Amino acid sequence: MGLTQYYYTQALHWFHSQGISAQKLSIGWHKWLITHPKVHRLRGQPVYVGDGIKVGKEGKKMPGVKKLHNESENVTKPEWMRGHYFGALALLLKAGYSLKAVPVILGLQDGIKTSEDDETTIVERMSSLCVELIHAGSYIILDAYFASKELIKEFRKHQLHLITRVRINAVGKHPSPTPTLKRSRGRPRVWGESVKLRNLFDEKDCFTTETLLLYGKMVTLRYRCCDLHWDSSVERVRFGKRFVARGQTNNPAFN
């Protein structure tokens, strides 16, 4: 906003003002941002990026501060810390040959309960944040931590597409086989044959090769996609894996 340090004391009153709603400001900002000509679109739909952010705080009586576990592999960070857990959502915009994540909304998602019996999880709050703000048909990129059945079910209900990462030991399932005229004894099969993704993507001959611009360089990319059941016997998800020419690999992801 272009304010200097001399306005810091006056700006502190904004946090206690009832005339400014951070939620309404975020919604208004998002309505303007989605009309920007540089919005990155996939199949004609905008692409969002969401994640949780842990910010360390030293205040012991600050609202929302709690003990948090640090999953980072950085040895300079402690395993446990006290701080705030924020849920963030950003929109991808084009900037030359790269993409920039422009923040849309940021809010506390842990440490504050609206009622005594409030047992809402972080995954459920992230799901609610995406559903309330993002329009149907959009794509959302989330960390593997949020890849749960509850979130996927909610996204399907509101026609949102999820792009995330799954573990290499994940198991997909083929569609159920066509029932025969003579039904056998027992309950009909809901799932088809199980498929271990680790073995599925070991078949290098089944990969498709493409050459594209990646990180400012032309590289050869090999990928494979498979539509399998994972969390539902009705809806399918798309699993995929890619190999870059320099030998780096990405874990399977699904959409």
Image: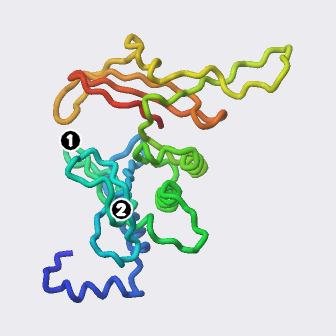
Q: Secondary structure at mark 1?
A: loop
Q: Is residue 41 visible?
A: yes
Examine the rendered structure and indicate whether residue 101 appears above or below residue 251: below
Residue where numbered disc 1 is placed: 97
**What amino acid type is highlighted by mark number 2?**
Val
**Residue 21, position as x, y percentages in the image:** 41, 79
Lower sequence index among marks 1 and 2: 1
Residue shown at 47%/19% (left/top)?
200
Rendered position, 154 above or below 86: above
Q: Is residue 181 above or below residue 233?
A: above
Return the residue at label 2.
104
| SS type, badge 2 | strand
| Residue at figure coordinates x 47%, y 24% from the top left | 197
Q: Quadrant of residue 91?
A: bottom left
Residue 78 placed where, x, y %?
27, 55
Can residue 38 be seen by looking at this rendering?
A: no
